[in-house]
Amino acid sequence: MTPHIVVIEDDITTRRRLSTALRKQLYRVSEAENADVMEGILARDPADLLLVDIGLEGKDGLTITREQRSLSNVGIILLTSRDDQIDRIVGLEMGADDYVTKPFDYRELLARVKGLLVRVMENRSAQAAQEPRTRFGDWTLDTSRRRLDNRDGRVEPLTRAEYELLHALVKTPGVALSRDRLLDLIQQRRWASDSRTIDVLIGRLRKKIEADPSRPDWIITVYGEGYLFASES
Amino acid sequence: MTPHIVVIEDDITTRRRLSTALRKQLYRVSEAENADVMEGILARDPADLLLVDIGLEGKDGLTITREQRSLSNVGIILLTSRDDQIDRIVGLEMGADDYVTKPFDYRELLARVKGLLVRVMENRSAQAAQEPRTRFGDWTLDTSRRRLDNRDGRVEPLTRAEYELLHALVKTPGVALSRDRLLDLIQQRRWASDSRTIDVLIGRLRKKIEADPSRPDWIITVYGEGYLFASES
DNA sequence: TTGAACTTGTAAAAGAATGTAAATGGAACC
DNA sequence: GGTTCCATTTACATTCTTTTACAAGTTCAA
């Protein structure tokens, strides 16, 4: 998945320039002019990296840094002026990973973004290694190899989409998830509004994990709402 | 091997004095009047220690510090004036190891250089000893010799690209790496956007390390995203 | 209960991405 | 010069995702 970067900057010109430069590198970029907008974006699509202007109106960059750092291990780069040296130090102490000084040298900026994204990924991999496997019935979802292991030792390979979908369901047992929400978690190509993709994939998953795919025990259809994963009885 | 020290200082008098003093101690000393010259020197002969004037024209000492620190664990001593206290603090935040104040007390300066070189060398050997190999399944990737050893003592030779690729994957288990990033990491960037190089190399690696290359246990394809290395057992 | 309007199931085809054997070309070595 | 090695490209087979098309199921007002 391409990394998601959020630019939080109130000056529209600067913000646009940054976004454009980043999009050229094929990053997924969202723009926010203040902390509220940023929070909305993060709620829908968590970021891998934040570029935060230190001198925002309202909730300022240092506050955002502290808040976000306490919530996740997202990468944070501060956008600073030549003359707020003290703020930079404070920023690093609050948990920012790096900073760049206005006016930007874009080559340098892109290098730092790339470098930090690498570090964020590495960090994430340490966590990925600890993610628990989930069991249901005779099956164990092996999150490190993205496949299903049966109790009898048989391995059932899952395709990417099947794995993502099952993972999403298994993570929130007992909750019906809409097709829209599920599509978000699977999306390879986003541009289809009335898509049957999820239904087809659900069908394939059922064939793989259900004893009788036409009378599923695990992946339950909720008419008009979506699908839910049965909680272990 | 005698330690290599690079002095980055634009004032020629100061630079010469420093070099002379250091050469008397039998260090190998290079001189650079700016960041560009320094980079040229480092490309040919990596340094053990940098002495960096904080108030350089062009790319300044703090920037150099930050850049070099992100690239290696070279020792860095900042050369500062009495009156840039803030810069010293920032410098240390950026990862400089120490600083000395102009005008220099040469006995003190040489003491600091000697002390830091000891630490740099110790650190380097500690790192080399720390994680020189990664194990997975029956295999051990020996990063100091750049080769792959089987538990039964057999050595599986890897080509340069195969080694770089496997190393990149093994370093971040549990995270899917895009073909783009992998191409970057194996350093043979040739602006072909639709390159199949990575796929071919992955295929060759699988033939070498997987029990059944068509159903890999370690190098897992994530359709539409890239490849990931399975974490842990 | 019936049937129109809707939602879901699914086989099959179309559209993309990946696997891989073989060919190509470039660099290092003799 | 020739030879070897190996990263890269090529070309085609295979696999995966999404769409399509229609069958089957569900809801609810009449």
Image (cartoon, coloured by chain):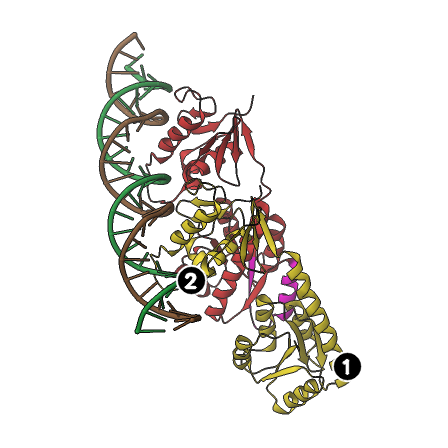
Chain colours: A red, B yellow, C brown, D green
Q: Is residue B19 magenta?
A: no
User: Mark 1 highlights which residue?
Assistant: B108
Q: Position of residue B2 (x, y in %)?
A: 66, 78
Indicate whether C1 appears above or below A71.
Answer: above
Label 1 element class:
helix
State which chain disc 1 sits on. Answer: B
Chain of the residue where label 2 is placed in the rendered structure = A
Question: Is A175 or B136 nearer to us in this picture?
Answer: B136
The crowd level at tag 2 (other Cα within 10 Å; few <14, some 14-19, many 20+) is: some
The quadrant in which the C terminus of chain A is found is: top right
Q: Are marks 1 and 2 in contact (CB under 8 Å)?
A: no
Quarter occupied by residue A26: bottom left
Instruction: Name the amino acid type tagged 1.
Output: Glu
Q: Nearer the viewer, mark 1 or mark 2?
A: 1
> Looking at the image, which is closer to me, B166 or A215?
B166
Badge number at residue A16 = 2
Q: Position of residue A20 (x, y in %)?
A: 40, 62
On the question of residue B105 being in view, the answer is no
Q: Which residues are magenta?
A: A76-94
Three-letter amino acid code at the position of disc 2: Arg
